[in-house]
Amino acid sequence: MQRLRLIVFGWLLVLLFSISPFEAAAQVSRSVGNISDTFEYATLDPSWRIVTLLNETVAMSTAQNHTPAGLRSLSISTTGPGQRNAYIQRTLGGLTKGTGTIYFYDSGPGFYAGFELVDTATGVHADIGAQDFDPTCYRAFVYLAADAVYGPNETCGPFPRVETTNVHRTVGWHKLTIASTSQGVTLSIDDQAVFTLAGSFAFDTAQLLVVGPHQTSMTYYFDDFSFSPPAECDVLLSSSTYGNGDAVVVSTLHMANHLAHPLPVELKLWLGVPGVSPISVVNLGANGSLVLPTGFEQTSGPFTLFQVAPSHPRGAYEFGCRSLSPVTGELLAEGIRAFTIQ
């Protein structure tokens, strides 16, 4: 195992210190952790799940002027009388901080429509978009509990409430952004911050919604969804199953800093072995000495962890990468890959 540590440690030194931030951005071959969807396919990507659909339809639209870029966007249309509900979700891959963005076509007053990032375990969520009862101003708020809802509380429009922003509604495309960092969560409309709540918030789900009881039929459009965590640390293996004589190979190790400033990280790589405590392979930066430059993004590999021998335990293994804040211990990024030795 000492040989394994030396191999990986030497490989990491090459990864982290032999390239400039510019070169790192240029050489990236994959982006684990980043999520994007331009809604260009003829059908909805299966990563999205229609959770609730009542008196509404979901479709991929090629309607003129309803695609900010490309040929298609996602449309949600209200149909029939009474209450209309449409909730569409996709997982972010785990509880994480980061920046989520969607382009939203506001077709006019009528329904509660927009974008949320949600912690599904607690119900805490950040929400931004159009209010059903307010034809004048957009909404933005953070929900912690039924008696703890926080927003900009502006006096815009005829029906101001805690979620009311000072941004007036206009028909057309608008960029909605929810950014969660270790300092707080900020909600923005067209790159204008409308509300910030201090605190540490993480989310595991992105949600698009159109709901309300209004009798008017309406179609709203969504396009160019993206989510970026503050940092990335992930691994991919060459296989999920190995036997005697096989080389356990890390195909790629991907690391990135998506923040607008250098990011100190404590980096950990470990090997989980059946029946024993996890084996530390690399542990760097606990003293703040390991700093990922602004714009750093690099995918490298492959390298061999070890060759399976008859003496190795059989069963479920894992190889993981984790980056933490060296000051607070806060989890910044994590990737774990399970494999089996038969």
Image (cartoon, rainbow, N blue to C red):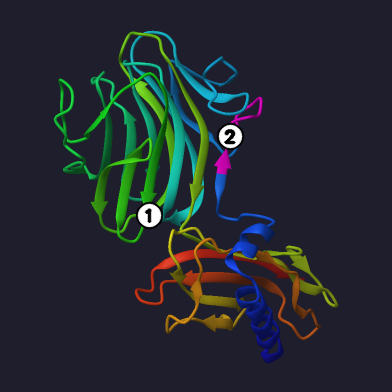
Which residue, given by chain and number where applicable, does mark 1 sit on?
Answer: 202
- Identify the amino acid type marked 1: Ala
- Identify the amino acid type marked 2: Thr
Q: Residue at 15%, 27% (x, y): give it.
A: 160
Q: Is residue 273 visible?
A: no
Which residue, given by chain and number where applicable, does mark 2 sit on?
Answer: 38
Q: Is residue 55 magenta?
A: no
Q: Nearer the viewer, residue 48 or 313?
A: 48
For mark 2, does the 10 Å Cα neighbourhood hold few (<14), some (14 to 19), or many (20 or more) residues? many
- 225 to the left or right of 70: left
Q: Can residue 106 be seen in this view?
A: yes
Q: Which of 265 and 83 is in front in this view?
A: 265
- 134 to the left or right of 65: left
Q: Main secondary structure of the magenta part?
A: loop
- Assign a secondary structure to mark 2: loop
What percent of the width, then of the height, locates residue 86? 43, 25
